[in-house]
Amino acid sequence: MDRWTLMAVLFCGFISYSYGQAGCQDSPSAECSLYNSDIICDSQGTHYLWAKENCPLYCGFCQSCQDSPFANCSLYNSNIICDSQGKYYLWAKENCPLYCGFCQGVSTRSTVSTSTGPGETTLKPTFSPGTKETEGVSTRSTVSTSTGPGETTLKPTFSPGTKETEVGHNVGRDNNEGCGPDISLSFRGGVRDTSGNRAAVDYSGVALVNGTACFDGSSRLYIWRYKSYDYRDKLQISFKFKPTPGPRIEPYTLVSNCEGNDEPSYGIGLNRFSNITTMFLKTDESEDQSMSFDINPTTWTDVYFRYQNGTMIGIVNTEIQTRSLIGNIKKRPDAMVFAHCKQYGNYRGLIKDIVVYSNCLPPLDKHVESYLNGFT
């Protein structure tokens, strides 16, 4: 049994993240927002025990954070409404905390024990008002999150069917200049978006081992910003996976927007009876298209999926395939989900290095361009 297989056996069955205390809230006297969450909430840090007791909501140690169902948060550009120095911050803090990643719906911290045993000290961080402490001071805006006298909670405006220059979620999607990912999950230090967009990522039953996420067949990972999302003709997903050894009792869904009653409009899965990975895509103007690739289930498989301007590109390890379609990706009400699909089947195995683009797409690699141009 190799190292990764052993880790999967050891960790998939016995480690999972489980949070969700009722009534979880921060201590008013702790003034949690004054402190840098990356420091005080670090499970390896000196202030962790104090933060666990006093700032569980601020640190994302509990699951009491949710978006208002009336806010339609996904309609808005998170880079704008979630900006702590922007004019919509107070509205977003109150109505879209999960979408903005203000309190990470499920903890993204390490599974280090939180019990206070003999010899452990609950160390409170220090903060001197008016000074810039380098250890505990928050790097966030100092704008109050409470709506007091004279403060205005400004809601962003969005007119469906128009291209708002400030808030509309499709703004800038045709500009590849300085294009960065929407989501980047390295699984180091937790299930946390490291793209800089602070995207909310929810997950259940996922174990982390050395930068790898382990899924046991009941685990799942949601990227909420893509709920009811209009991808138009732009989507790129890449990751690595290695399934649990042995026969598969059902197809393994690696990623899709498959949670509701509608058929998913895109997806990547591993066949049940053969070692074949299949990608599929559905647009509003074309017949469904798919492509299949042989894989070796005992080694890591690199997966790359892209749709842009009518061309679907699939790359598995070194094999490249393309399909032509017309139109935009069919819109679905469901989020992007990894490792779970009640219609097809749930994934068992390891996944790492998830990167997703949709706001813009990066330039193609030269070898892919050469393939598309007929130079192989």
Image (cartoon, grey):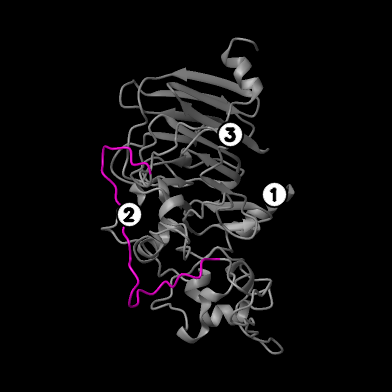
| Residue 302, above or below 150 | above
Residue 289 lies, in percent from the top left, at 41, 22
* Mark 3 → mark 2, Cα distance in angstroms: 37 Å
Considering depth in this image, is 341 or 171 the residue closer to the camera? 171
Q: Quadrant of the C terminus?
A: top right
Q: Residue at x 64, y 78 (%)?
A: 47
Binning the other alpha carbons within 10 Å of mark 2 as few (below 14), some (14 to 19) or many (20 upward) gives some
Binning the other alpha carbons within 10 Å of mark 3 as few (below 14), some (14 to 19) or many (20 upward) gives many
Residue 132 lies, in percent from the top left, at 64, 73
Q: Is residue 274 visible?
A: no
- Tell me the element at label 2: loop
Q: Which residue is mark 1?
A: 4
Disc ID at residue 156: 2
Q: Is residue 269 left or right of residue 375?
A: left
Q: Amino acid at mark 2?
A: Pro
Disc ID at residue 303: 3
- Tell me the element at label 3: strand
| Residue 339, above or below 104 | above
Considering depth in this image, is 282 or 87 the residue closer to the camera? 87
Binning the other alpha carbons within 10 Å of mark 1 as few (below 14), some (14 to 19) or many (20 upward) gives some
Per the rendered image, the range of residues in magenta is 140-165
Q: Which label sits in the foreground, 1 or 2? A: 2
* Mark 1 → mark 2, Cα distance in angstroms: 47 Å
Find the residue positioned furthest to the top: 374
Disc with the residue nearer the chain's start (3 vs 2) = 2
Q: Is residue 114 left or right of residue 286?
A: right
Q: Main secondary structure of the magenta part?
A: loop
Q: Is residue 344 left or right of residue 114?
A: left
